[in-house]
Image (cartoon, coloured by chain):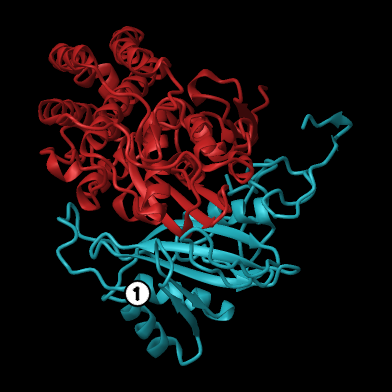
Chain colours: A cyan, B red
Amino acid sequence: MAESEAKGRNAVPKITFSPVPVPEAPTVVGSNPPKDIEAAAAALTSALGAGSVLKVEKAHKGDPFIVVKTEKLFDAICFLRDDSNFLCTNLEVIATVDYLAKDAVPAVDAQPAQPAVQPRIENVYVISSFQFKHQFTIKVYLDRDQPKVQSICDLYRSANWYERECYDMVGVVFVGHPNHARVLLPTDWVGHPLRRDYVFPEEYNGMKVPL
Amino acid sequence: MIETMDTEQEFQTQDLVINMGPQHPSTHGVLRVEIVSDGEIIKAAYPDLGYLHRSMEKHSEGREYLQVVPYTDRMDYVAAMNMELGYCLAVENLLGAEIPERAQALRVIVCELNRIASHLLAVGTYSLDIGGFTPFLYAFRDRERVLRIFEELCGARLLYNYIRPGGVSRDMSKGLQEKVSEFCKYFKPQLDEMNELLTGNSIFVQRTANVGVIPLDMAISYGLSGPNLRASGLNWDIRKEKPYSGYEKYDFKVSIGEAEKGVIGDCWNRYYSRIKEMYESIKIIEQAVAQLTDGEHMGKVAKSVKPVGEVYLATECPRGALGYYLVADGSKKPYRLKVKSSCFIAISTMDEMCSGMMLADVVAFIGSLDIVIGETDR
């Protein structure tokens, strides 16, 4: 029988993935020294051209991160995944953070002063390598009104659901995503709850929402 | 004359859309899977999440750091200690807090005990899915002992609220330490018994070996972690590779799939890597109890903390790597807390993996991934 069309509400067109470079199994991992964020930023600049890396931030506590140009995101992640010096074959997470406009906070109680924040949406990609044991945080800054970025579903299969979640919760649109639908909330839900200015609905389908 | 029917017409089959769940017992919670089947063969399977969505990430934006801990409990309610640990490590990382040695060791003990409890549940219910009722009872009998230890330690059996930023909420008494050591002694033979009962059982092996094979490149591309990734043959355990909470002090082996039965990456190897991990957990607990030093169980961390910065931290939970991406803006509440759940990703493999499978194997496949819906939906 000929391959019939897939039925069902959640039917998705099948997509082909570009293969991931795989460590030899069972590899004793981490024999190579990890690369630091400066090396990654320098490699990205030389591979993607000047101006593609907007910022390397490592003054704050926690993980340092690289901000890349929104148009260069796919290429940047693809480079870090496939380059033999980085091999970031593992996509740890895609997180989205919504920033409303915020005034500068002066230093209080031994806390450092913080700069004023422009309203924006940050898409955060955490990728790591099994061979090198390093982990990089790549960010893109998106426009709050029309957040739009290229999908990286072709690079990692896991990106598919992470990106759906980002769309579901914050409303980021991923260009080229094979199944751009909500994943956790009902399909008829209005709005994106993890926006900072989200107003909780009083009613859902005629039912009162308890607050 | 007998009229002969066209065989093409006679055997014309039709696609049937079946709903599996959300109340199906083998979906381990409230997962709904929309299955398109042609007879016994699955053509596609579309998981539908969100039946247990409690918007933990949104709630945590409105709570103080300490108040978020109970919310993390309720994600993976089967391994709540491990959920708490990841969150507390992320907060402590931003605070730069020093954790007393005793608190670190206590954390390791409770997390490994919880890992055993969680794997027992996974293995027990897996055998139940496949049709073996007895191992389930044995597993729950032993799990009960772990829960009793936890009950004595912190008063709760499932949702502990035990690990806090800075340490742990209560100290472990000498008597309870002995009980933990006793449990380790008791549990090893029980695990051997479980091996005899289930691991080599030919019916069980036939149902699980060579079924649902996830090759390594696919496992990596999907970002699988924990026992699911190790069963596909990668020697990767966060406790070994990026040690936290003093795991570097303990001697244990990473339990990767070695295809004693079936092939690497199949359901049986995923099951067996959990059994092997329980043996290693006992080893870790025994060492941790033996090396337990006197001291404080809580470091000097204020109840209301105001960290600044952002960090992504992953820990090795029973179901794989659980990561917290925490953005702290210097206020009392987290600005954003994103949870990377390994079950969420494990379920996303279903569509690709289940196409072409037999209907009965889907149950074996879901069970071998060991998903907890509380963690996927958060």
Residue B144 visible in the displayed image:
yes
Question: Which residue shows up at 68% across the image and 66% down it?
Answer: A102
Question: Which residue shows up at 60% across the image and 66% down it?
Answer: A105
Left or right: residue A58 versus residue A159 is: left
Displayed quadrant of residue B263: top left
Pointer 1 chain: A
Of helix, strand and loop, which one carries label 1? Answer: helix
Residue positioned most to the right: A206
Across and down, in percent, residue B92 comes to 38, 48
Residue B41 visible in the displayed image:
no
Q: Name the quarter where the N terminus of chain B is drawn.
A: top right
Across and down, in percent, residue B47 comes to 57, 38
Question: Which residue shows up at 50% across the image and 38% down it?
Answer: B66
Question: Which residue shows up at 55% across the image and 69% down it?
Answer: A114
Q: Name the quarter where the C terminus of chain B is drawn.
A: top right
Residue positioned most to the bottom: A50
Across and down, in percent, residue B76 comes to 46, 31
Q: Amino acid at mark 1?
A: Ile
Question: Relative to B345, does residue A97 appear above or below in the rendering?
Answer: below
Question: Relative to A12, does residue B358 appear above or below in the rendering?
Answer: above
Question: B49 and B40: which one is in front?
Answer: B49
Count of picture labels: 1
Left or right: residue A144 versus residue B166 is: right
Across and down, in percent, residue B269 comes to 25, 34
Question: Relative to B313, does residue A86 appear above or below in the rendering?
Answer: below
For label 1, the residue is A37
Instruction: Report crowding for label 1: few under 14, some 14 to 19, many 20 or more residues within 10 A (C-alpha).
Output: many
